[in-house]
């Protein structure tokens, strides 16, 4: 058994106040009482936190926490990585306490993306209440959402997640750009053992912030529309208009975070509870409708 879900992400930011305003007022996450002048923790469900924003000298993605469902699965996964010669760093007691998990190791995928592999299923013990009135984020055994990583070693990075971390193919597409390569840029969407269509995707697109985007899912289209209204009112850059993807059927829009990468904010993503019966797709057209892009600066 491999990775089940995306547990959390860590982000470096120059302006924590901007992230607090964006996280609470637009996304609808809640800052925790443990947040201070150097670290902002944001909740979206019964976990102690899902976003950790750390004050630093740049705006950049730090790491993704990928969660194994049990200690046994975690140990098996770590052993497979070690046997494959992947360089691992064990989390010390202070780091494990900070992440509020029971065990962790750190590594990089072949594209240089930083991963924290964890287990422990922590719960906050207090109800999540959205300051923006969001009724529910869709998480549970599907985790936080998904992340899309850049890589200049496309096939090697795909193999790392599939062969060593237990991911499976959900969908692949080639993105054709006016000045891009003739074969297009590859995008590979991979599912963990949880039911979310994809937990990790890798793409040949570059990203100066270290991440293409992350995704949060809410319970219905009205919540998506209300978030879009909040984003526009707050002056947040809308990277993509509302649309529906072909592969995971998510209805969503994309907005720019204070750290420069995007958050996809969506609903109605398909779920698969028996991956042995799933046939991976090859998507020729990214969207059924919508998603007009404005990458901005």
Image (cartoon, grey):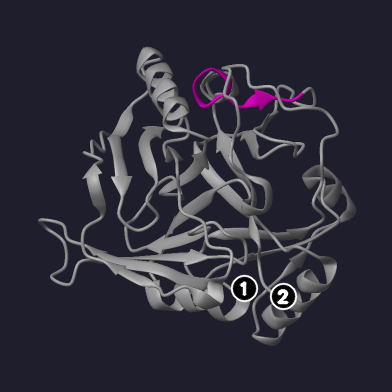
Measured Cα–Cα span from mark 1 to mark 2: 6 Å
Q: Please tell me how crowded label 2 is: few (under 14), some (14-19), or many (20+) other residues with Cα within 10 Å.
A: many
| Circle 1 residue | 165
Q: Decide if residue 199 is on the left or right side of residue 280.
A: right
Looking at the image, which residue sits at the far right? 93
Q: Report the quarter where the C terminus lies.
A: top left
Q: Position of residue 191 (x, y in %)?
A: 52, 65
Q: Decide if residue 158 is on the left or right side of residue 62.
A: left
Identify the residue at horizontal 21%, vertical 38% (top origin).
292
Q: Position of residue 165 (x, y in %)?
A: 62, 73
Q: Report the quarter where the N terminus lies.
A: bottom right
User: Is mark 1 in CB contact (under 8 Å) with mark 2?
Assistant: yes
Q: Decide if residue 262 is on the left or right side of residue 162.
A: left
| Circle 2 residue | 77
User: Does residue 192 lie above or below 32 as drawn?
Assistant: below
Badge 2 marks a residue whose secondary structure is helix
Q: Decide if residue 285 is on the left or right side of residue 93.
A: left
Badge 1 marks a residue whose secondary structure is helix
Q: Quadrant of residue 44?
A: top right
Identify the residue at horizontal 39%, vertical 32% (top origin).
256
Q: Quadrant of residue 239?
A: top left
Residue stretch rendered in magenta on the structure: 24-32
**N-term-proximal mark, 1 vs 2:** 2
């Amino acid at each position: 058994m491999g990775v089940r879900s995306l547990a959390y992400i860590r982000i470096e930011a120059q302006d924590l106040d901007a992230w607090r305003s964006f996280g609470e007022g637009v996304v609808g996450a809640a800052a925790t009482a443990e947040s201070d002048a150097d670290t902002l923790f944001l909740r979206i469900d019964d976990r102690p936190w899902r976003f950790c924003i750390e004050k630093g000298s740049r705006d950049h993605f730090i790491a993704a926490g990928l969660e194994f469902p049990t200690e046994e699965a975690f140990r098996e996964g770590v052993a497979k990585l070690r046997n494959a010669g992947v360089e691992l760093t064990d989390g010390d007691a202070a780091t494990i306490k900070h992440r509020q998990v029971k065990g962790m190791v750190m590594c990089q995928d072949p594209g240089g993306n930083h991963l924290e592999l964890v287990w422990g299923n922590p719960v906050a013990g207090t109800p999540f209440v959205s300051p923006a009135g969001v009724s529910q984020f869709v998480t549970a055994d599907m985790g936080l959402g998904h992340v899309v990583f850049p890589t200049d070693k496309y096939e090697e990075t795909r193999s790392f997640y599939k062969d060593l971390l237990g991911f499976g193919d959900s969908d692949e597409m080639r993105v054709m750009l006016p000045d891009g390569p003739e074969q297009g840029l590859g995008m590979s969407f991979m599912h963990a053992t949880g039911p979310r269509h994809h937990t990790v995707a890798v793409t040949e697109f570059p990203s100066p912030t270290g991440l293409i985007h992350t995704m949060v899912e809410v319970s219905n289209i009205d919540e998506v529309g209300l978030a879009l209204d909040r984003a526009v009112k707050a002056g947040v850059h809308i990277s993509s208009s509302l649309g529906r993807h072909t592969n995971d059927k998510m209805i969503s829009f994309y907005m720019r975070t204070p750290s420069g990468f995007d958050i996809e904010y969506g609903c109605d993503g398909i779920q698969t509870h028996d991956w042995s019966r799933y046939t991976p797709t090859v998507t020729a057209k990214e969207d059924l409708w919508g998603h007009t892009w404005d990458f901005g600066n």
